[in-house]
Amino acid sequence: MRLDLKILNKQDINTALDQQGFCLIDSTALLELTKLSASDLQRFATYWDNLVEDRYLKDLGRYRFRRHSSYKVENQQTSLMSHRAHWQSLDYNALHGGINRMFEPIDTTLNDSQSWLNLISGVASLINHKSDSNLPHTWFTEAHQFRINTMGGIGRPTPEGAHRDGVDYVAVILIKRHLIKGGETRLFNIHGNDGVRFTLEEPWSLLLIDDHRIIHETTPIQDNGGQGFRDTLILTYRSNGFQEPK
């Protein structure tokens, strides 16, 4: 697969998603495409300092902190949904699938922010603009705030390994890297061994993935100077409702 960082407009996104199943968008382009300001992003980032330990990790690690909320994006408007558990089938998450994981919701002040809701609908607009007339006007969206730390010596952003999420599109936004090494992103085409590897380093750079075509993972992080961590925002977009137990 080809790695192209020169995303300048929505047509570039269309082309990249069509040709390779993913695209990378730098922070400048993200601001332009979503009509947000740099001060909006700086304000959002402060909410990563108040996440809650993930008690569902089956490796018994204490390196992952998170919050989770669900939304519906309809006609470019984002609505917060009632708080619900996060669920994935074992087909997509062999480690933590098949169980209802009830995480603490994203901070009320953030969820009440119109700029935050505009970020979610703004990323959805990048998908809706894709040259596919069958794309829906409604997306069932989940937002996951993650902080992976290295206090135990190592932190695993994707303890389940290379995987898909069971949605239509996944957006991975880097918020911050602090005193760490590692955390390499790896993408593989589901229909072969073709893949790319790179490290997200610029705050508020966006990786957009077609979940039907691409398997993804992030390698472990290690301390590089004391109390290191990696903050990300994961947004998932699914057209036919939230994932639920059968």
Image (cartoon, rainbow, N blue to C red):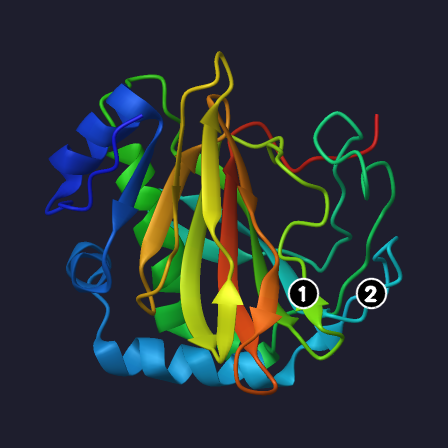
Left or right, 84 with reference to 223: right
Rendered view: 218 above or below 1: below
- What residue appears at the point 76 percent right and 63 percent down from the top-left corner? 103
Can the viewer see residue 122 in this picture? Answer: yes
- What type is the residue that disc 1 sits on? Gly
Rendered view: 244 above or below 29: above
Front residue of this view, candidates 235 and 224: 224
- What type is the residue that disc 2 sits on? Gly
Residue 236 appears at what percent x and percent y?
52, 44
Left or right, 3 with reference to 118: left
Packing grade of label 2 (10 A; few <14, some 14-19, many >=20) is: some
Tag shown at residue 17: none
Residue receiving disc 2 = 61
Left or right, 243 with reference to 17: right
Can the viewer see residue 112 in this picture? Answer: no
Whether tag 1 and tag 2 are in contact, CB under 8 A, the answer is: yes
Picture quadrant of residue 117: bottom left
Residue 149 appears at what percent x and percent y?
64, 74
Residue receiving disc 1 = 155
